[in-house]
Image: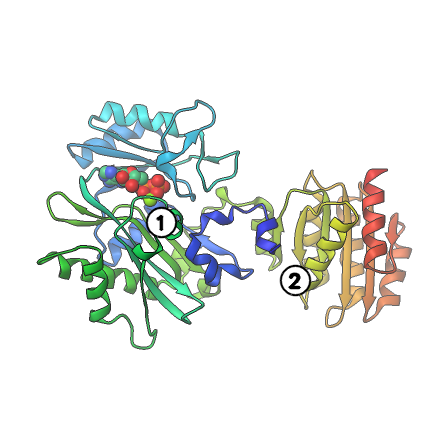
Amino acid sequence: MSLLNRARIPITQTSAFLRFSAGQQQVRHLNLHEYQSKMLMDKYGVNTQKWRVISNASEAQKAAKELNAKELVIKAQVHAGGRGKGTFIETGFKGGVQLCTTPQEAERLSAEMLGKHLVTKQTTKDGTLVQKVMIAESVDPSRELYFAILMDRASGGPVLVASPKGGVDIEAVAEETPELIFKEPIDIMKGVQPEQTLRLAKKLGFTGDKVAVAQKQMENLYELFIKSDATQVEVNPFAETTNGEIYAMDAKINFDDNASFRQKQIFDMRDVAEEDPREVAASKFGLNYIGMDGNIGCLVNGAGLAMATMDIIKLHKGTPANFLDVGGGATADQVREAFKIITTDPQVKAILVNIFGGIMKCDIIAQGVVSACQQIGLKIPLVVRLAGTNVEIGQKILKDSGFNIITAVDLDDAAIKAVAAMNK
Ligand code: ADP
Ligand code: MG
């Protein structure tokens, strides 16, 4: 079982294609809301409908009037896709994407969505709180298509993906009619070539002078992808309207976290409200954290050791509450913060520290653990297994701390003791 499968983060939030690409790695990708993505698209000349975003239903009428459109579409802004077919938990109201014609209706529909939790195929069963709603001019699509650009491991670069079967779940299309998905791998040094967008435009069924318009939209999306260090730009539906215009009706863009240093404007748009607060806290201190559903908090160094620790906990009938990797060169401060994140999680009933000291020395870990206990107290059982560099000094620090720390000799012993301590 892969690490991502165990994680509580909804991996379905990324498309099926992404699982073959960079998304498989243990990296976090910045997620933007549709309205934020559309702001970027506007900047790169990608065609979007006019829109406004509101966070209070009382602002809906004004926004609707400004748009001055015959028909409006009201869209819940959450990071997950599949909103159109979603349901609001509190009310049972169906559909996070709604059409209407009057400002009054726009207000009523916004009120149905704001402050409620929307459950879609891509959220957890608890859904996501809707804090913003987009009001956009409605367009009348004659055809709903699919277009995406992904960083693809198989071809070692970006790949354009297009399908005439858009508007629906692309995962389902890939499964049922894979022949309707077309790909064009891009040589990142040369960039996207006109013959590539021409082939895709034709496969998407554009004819006449629409072919060139569609090609230009694909080029603009590619420029956005490259210039903003995206790992995924997914437009579904990519639509042709009854009056012959081409629109990006929905947008989902993910970015490479490693590029955050040069994409400040984009990363400043991060909405942490939808992220696991423990992951947000961890990333602030340069720690790798993934929350899970169990109750044994794990503090380890190295992804491999983390995986092994989780497996052994499971073997001994426990369930890990998280994956917290302090990495190779953590400081005592980082260890303390890591420890705080674990202990402030109410579902954690026991803590297992499993450190193999190489570059990371055992005494540093021990200092961090003790200093965290001093700051926040130790209310649940703590099992520590240290091995490697400075192990004796580390063990002495733990012993002299006065806290009731259970030590373990190896991984098996540690897991058994953690599970037992929790069940006492
Ligand atoms: P999601 O993918 O989260 O369900 P979309 O933005 O794709 O959200 O919207 C779902 C469906 O709603 C679209 O496939 C399209 O049929 C319709 N829709 C979305 N935006 C508009 C719009 N501006 N005008 C008309 N219909 C729209
Ligand atoms: Mg969509």
Contact (CB < 8 A) between labels 1 and 2?
A: no
Q: Residues within 10 Å of mark 2 (few under 14, many from 20)?
A: some
The tag earlier along the polypeptide, 1 or 2, is 1
Q: What residue is disc 1 on?
A: 173
Expressed as whole percent of the image width and height from the top left, the position of residue 273 reads: 49, 42
Q: Is residue 304 left or right of residue 142?
A: right
Q: Of 32 and 4, which appears nearest the observer? A: 4
Q: Of 346 and 403, which appears nearest the observer? A: 346
Mark number displayed over residue 386:
none
Q: Of 401 and 325, which appears nearest the observer? A: 325
Q: Is residue 43 above or below residue 116?
A: below
Q: Distance of mark 1 from mark 2, alpha carbons?
A: 34 Å
Residue at (68, 68) in percent of width and height: 329
Q: What residue is disc 2 on?
A: 303
Residue kind at label 2, given as amino acid type? Ala
Q: Quadrant of residue 161?
A: bottom left
Q: Is residue 243 above or below residue 336?
A: above
Expressed as whole percent of the image width and height from the top left, the position of residue 147 reads: 29, 55
Q: Quadrant of the C terminus?
A: top right
- Ligand 1 is located in which of the four quadrants? top left
